[in-house]
Image (cartoon, helix red, strand yellow):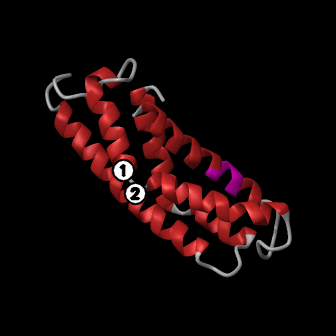
Amino acid sequence: MSDDLKRRIDAIEEGYEFFLAYAAQGLTDDSASKAGEQVRSYLRGFEEALDGLDEAFRGRLLEGGGDGAAKSAVPGGGAGAAGAVDAALDVLRRDAEAARALVRLVAAQPAVSSQLIDNLNASIHVRALLTDVFVLGELVGV
């Protein structure tokens, strides 16, 4: 479970970092540069990492594999811990679904400009997803 979760988090973080750099290039489409060739691969990897992300975190939280605060997030780790885990993972699932819808829409376009990627980066859905991943990642020690 740990390797799968780390792979997903890495794909999300690497994709987002690539998108930031791509957005700064001022490209009108993805056909004229090496970065343009890569953008669709990063979009695909980002999208794939989101499918089942909540369940990957659930497994890690329930096995208690994290350090520090993660131990208090597992059922039996305190009053309401199981409910807190479920609620947080529901938020992650919704945020991942929203971000995934936008990533799919961008990837379906015939041309992916820097401006389009910049707007994707600025999306509240992508930012919420990143925040979810950072908080939960800290809890499980990934």
Q: Quadrant of residue 19?
A: bottom right
Q: Where in the figure is residue 101, as x and y percent of width and height?
A: 46, 69
The residue carrying pointer 1 sits among few (fewer than 14), some (14 to 19) or many (20 or more) residues within 10 Å by Cα, namely many
Q: Where in the figure is residue 62, as x and y percent of width and height?
A: 26, 31
Return the residue nearer the eye: 118 or 86.
86
Residue at image position (43%, 31%) is 2
Would you place residue 30 above or below residue 1 in this image?
A: below
**Residue range corresponding to the magenta coloring:** 15-19
Residue at image position (28%, 51%) is 90
Residue at image position (78%, 59%) is 24
Would you place residue 124 above or below residue 28 in this image?
A: above
For the residues marked 2 and 1, what is the alpha-carbon distance in whole angstroms? Answer: 5 Å
> Is most of the magenta stretch helix, strand or loop?
helix
Q: Circle 2 is placed at which residue position?
A: 95
The residue carrying pointer 2 sits among few (fewer than 14), some (14 to 19) or many (20 or more) residues within 10 Å by Cα, namely many
Q: Circle 1 is placed at which residue position?
A: 92
Would you place residue 49 above or below residue 115 in this image?
A: above
Q: Is residue 88 left or right of residue 5?
A: left
